[in-house]
Image (cartoon, coloured by chain):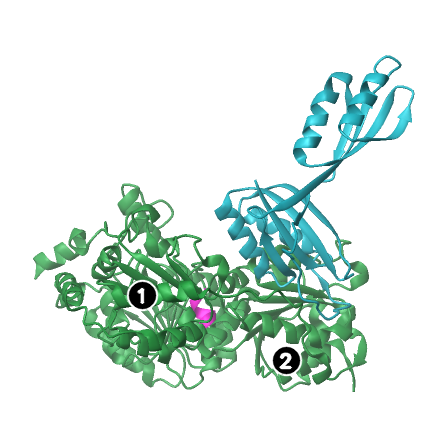
């Protein structure tokens, strides 16, 4: 069958199982758009190409499949850069297709020409320029394999206009991936495995650090068995949230900079850490010199370059989390760890009494209350999509996720503006899910143009803006470390409810705690998208907090908060 | 100093990918040589980097993550043969020439060009040997010098070879 390169793009994507493409047209990709119109693919017209990449990313994270974004050459491609880097840092399988000027014009500074493969080299898992129609199908198939295998990541395929327009024979089966054959390495020696088993069966104070890799490898079931066979408590990374149910008594909650005190203390006091599919990011470890000094470490990780990168480990088990856990499981002996578990319970009790949730309504609207109410009202079953900053940390602390892929958040890159478009992608991946954007007033303003995409696509997404009139997390750092010099963090915003109305979305502004639950209910009952502007306490901070580069056990605890103290006095 | 051997796809842009990785890891490359292998689609690199063992491990593992890199191995701790090739243009007049010729013999260098006032010498060997020759040549006046950068191979039966791979024509990796 003779097809143009552009038609082959659509045929190949369809054959690969793609149903949705998030994109924005332009000159150098017009042939593909013309072919899209005749294809079965559903194209979602975004309002900015950054949005397209975040949507594809959100789609990938919510579904576990590959998300596809599309843009034209030049500015269309460069607008994708932030979204590509976001997907890279969080190992998200996204395939970006960009149009490129004709091959004979490459390197001539032609109109809207940019070296996008050069630009994205360090932020993609792989990228390729395609200059012949004959290579389109095979390259796209390879892109899907690369994006979704091993440690997933974004792949960019840059297709010149002449390759889109040229005609050639198309046969999906004949265009099988031909990836370079790499040397196979032995993942781990038997000695490493035996050492891990011995450490696991002899530890007195063991702790599991559960990361995103559990979800990526689909290891949830065996992980659960592993935890309960070994009877070892679990601390979660931000991206690991959902991989292990929050309501399991062995789940301690999130670790790291804004992890609960008992979690970080447990890490610092442990004699064995079992890290599964996580990479000892600096937001998780704090100061490396003082990090878990008494603990031996087992690292189960698919990416060999992560081994001994930040934390030196005693046993490295390179491989897919599910396969490694399945191999370990038969060797695990059940231990009571009674003293250790009792000690953690004690630490936990101490924190619980300081928690802001313990405070009755005192007239102030706290973000933590809003998120906790949202959790209760949605039965913890919503897909929550967050940006980066205070609201993100409050979400991680107060929305308790029991299912995988129900928290979609920008962790590694910490991208403001991620939430709204990523939620659109998540909604297309899970059309029946209750999708909530939880976003700050700053981040929302970065990509709020995508409200128009929501309306045009007639999808139902609920948006909770945690509006404190500040770039809250930066303000918090200024409060703690810059003597409250609030430079460039106070921020005015439009009337978000009125803005939503202007886009054709219902909007409400909430200032009192009593109105939180009824409005969340109204939003859930509404058939159309619904935006709630929660005007929360302006100078509230996220606690506990380990200052950047500080020791993990030396955190700023909740009682230090003047807000909570004031609130307590007012009771 | 650490020495790595890598086999890569012989395509435009792969060198950029390799050097860009070293830059991202803040590792300074002392020398990088690349040349064809028996398989036209595979090139072999020798990378000598200013870093410690840990840095070399990161470079090795990060390189091997790249789709276009078929094999990357830190060979610094293995029995290794390393060679460097240099061409040296040195001042040589009637009086100094006989003296120079003796040194050339000692270092097993070769004269590959003769001009009235200068010679070009070719010498290969370890870095130390070439550094040594350069040191004794300096008093005569070294006018110009070029070195190939190091190539390395592990000794004996310690083989570094990637599996063969099918041809991939037409698709170009980023330049």
Q: Chain of mark 2?
A: A
Count the numbered circles shown. 2
SS at circle 2? helix
Dividing the picture into quarters, in which one does residue A192 lie? bottom left
Q: Main secondary structure of the magenta part?
A: helix
**Drawn side of residue A399 relative to residue B60, left or right:** left
- Reading the image, the residue beneath label 1 is A198
**Drawn side of residue B128 relative to residue A253, left or right:** right
Dividing the picture into quarters, in which one does residue B94 lie? top right
Of residues A526 and A274, the one nearer the viewer is: A274
Q: Provide the letter of the chain coloured green.
A: A
**Magenta segment range?**
A418-422
Q: Position of residue A203 (x, y in %)?
A: 25, 63
Of residues A75 and A352, the one nearer the viewer is: A352
The residue under the point 83% across, 15% down is B96
Q: Provide the letter of the chain coloured cyan.
A: B
- Reading the image, the residue beneath label 2 is A13
Q: Chain of mark 1?
A: A
SS at circle 1? helix
The residue under the point 40% across, 79% down is A529
Of residues B77 and A290, the one nearer the viewer is: B77
**Drawn side of residue A83 relative to residue A201, left or right:** right
């Amino acid at each position: 069958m003779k097809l143009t390169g552009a038609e082959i793009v659509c045929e190949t994507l369809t054959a690969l199982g793609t149903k949705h493409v998030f994109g924005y047209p332009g000159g150098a990709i017009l042939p593909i758009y013309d072919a899209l119109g005749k294809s079965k693919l559903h194209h979602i017209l975004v309002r900015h190409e950054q949005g397209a990449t975040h949507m594809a990313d959100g789609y990938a994270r919510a579904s576990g499949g590959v998300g596809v974004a599309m843009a034209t050459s030049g500015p269309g491609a460069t607008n994708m850069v932030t979204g590509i880097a976001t997907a890279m840092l969080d190992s998200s399988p996204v395939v970006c297709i960009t149009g490129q000027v004709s091959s004979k014009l490459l390197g001539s500074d032609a109109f809207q020409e940019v070296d996008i493969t050069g630009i994205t080299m360090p932020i993609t898992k792989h990228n390729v320029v395609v200059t012949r129609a004959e290579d389109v199908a095979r390259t796209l198939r390879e892109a899907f394999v690369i994006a979704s295998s091993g440690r997933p990541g974004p792949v960019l395929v840059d297709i010149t206009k002449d390759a889109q327009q040229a005609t050639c024979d198309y046969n999906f089966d004949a265009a099988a991936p031909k990836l370079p054959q790499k040397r196979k390495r032995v993942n781990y020696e038997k000695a490493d495995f035996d050492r891990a088993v011995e450490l696991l069966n002899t530890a007195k104070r063991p702790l599991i650090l559960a990361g995103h890799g559990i979800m990526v490898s689909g290891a949830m079931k065996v992980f659960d068995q592993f935890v309960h066979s070994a009877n070892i408590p679990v601390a979660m990374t931000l991206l690991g949230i959902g991989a292990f149910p929050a309501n399991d008594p062995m789940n301690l909650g999130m670790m790291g900079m804004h992890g609960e005190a008992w979690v970080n203390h447990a890490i610092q006091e442990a004699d064995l850490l079992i890290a599964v599919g996580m990479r000892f990011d600096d937001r998780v470890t704090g100061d490396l010199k003082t990090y878990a000094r008494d603990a031996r470490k087992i690292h189960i990780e698919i990416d060999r370059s992560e081994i001994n990168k930040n934390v030196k480990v005693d046993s490295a088990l390179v491989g897919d989390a599910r396969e490694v856990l399945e191999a370990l499981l038969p060797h695990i002996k059940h231990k009571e760890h009674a003293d250790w578990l009792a000690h953690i319970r004690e630490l936990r009790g101490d924190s619980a009494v300081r928690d802001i949730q313990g405070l009755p309504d005192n007239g102030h609207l706290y973000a933590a209350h809003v998120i906790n109410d949202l959790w209760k009202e949605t039965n913890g079953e919503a897909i929550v999509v967050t940006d980066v900053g205070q609201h993100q940390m409050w979400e991680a602390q107060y929305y308790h996720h029991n299912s995988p892929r129900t928290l979609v958040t920008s962790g590694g890159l910490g991208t403001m503006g991620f939430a709204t478009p990523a939620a659109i992608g998540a909604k297309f991946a899970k059309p029946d899910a209750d999708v909530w954007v939880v976003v700050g007033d700053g981040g929302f303003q970065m990509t709020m143009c995508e409200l128009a995409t929501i309306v045009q696509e007639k999808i139902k997404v609920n948006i909770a803006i945690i509006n404190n009139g500040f770039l809250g997390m930066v303000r918090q750092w200024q409060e703690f470390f810059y003597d409250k010099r609030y430079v460039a963090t106070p921020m005015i915003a439009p009337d978000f409810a009125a803005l939503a109305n202007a886009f054709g979305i219902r909007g409400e502004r909430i200032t009192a705690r009593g109105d939180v639950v009824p409005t969340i209910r109204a939003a859930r009952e509404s058939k159309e998208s619904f935006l709630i502007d929660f005007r929360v306490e302006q100078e509230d901070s996220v606690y506990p907090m380990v200052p950047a580069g500080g020791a993990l056990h030396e955190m700023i605890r909740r009682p230090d908060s003047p807000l909570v103290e004031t609130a307590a006095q007012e009771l | 100093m650490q020495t790595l051997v890598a086999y890569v796809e012989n395509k435009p842009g792969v060198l950029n990918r390799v050097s860009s990785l070293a830059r991202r890891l803040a590792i300074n490359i002392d020398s990088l040589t690349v040349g064809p292998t028996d398989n036209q689609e595979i090139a072999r690199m020798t990378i000598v980097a200013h870093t410690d063992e840990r840095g070399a491990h990161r470079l090795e593992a990060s390189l091997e993550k790249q789709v276009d890199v078929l094999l990357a191995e830190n060979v610094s701790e293995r029995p290794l043969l390393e060679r460097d090739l240099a061409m040296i243009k040195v001042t040589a007049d009637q009086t100094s020439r006989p003296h120079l010729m003796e040194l050339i013999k000692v270092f097993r260098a070769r004269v590959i060009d003769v001009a009235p006032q200068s010679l070009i010498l070719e010498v290969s060997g370890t870095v130390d040997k070439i550094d040594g020759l350069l040191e004794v040549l300096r008093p005569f006046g070294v006018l110009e010098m070029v070195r190939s950068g190091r190539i390395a191979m592990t000794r004996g039966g310690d083989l570094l070879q990637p599996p063969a791979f099918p041809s991939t024509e037409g698709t170009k990796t980023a330049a």
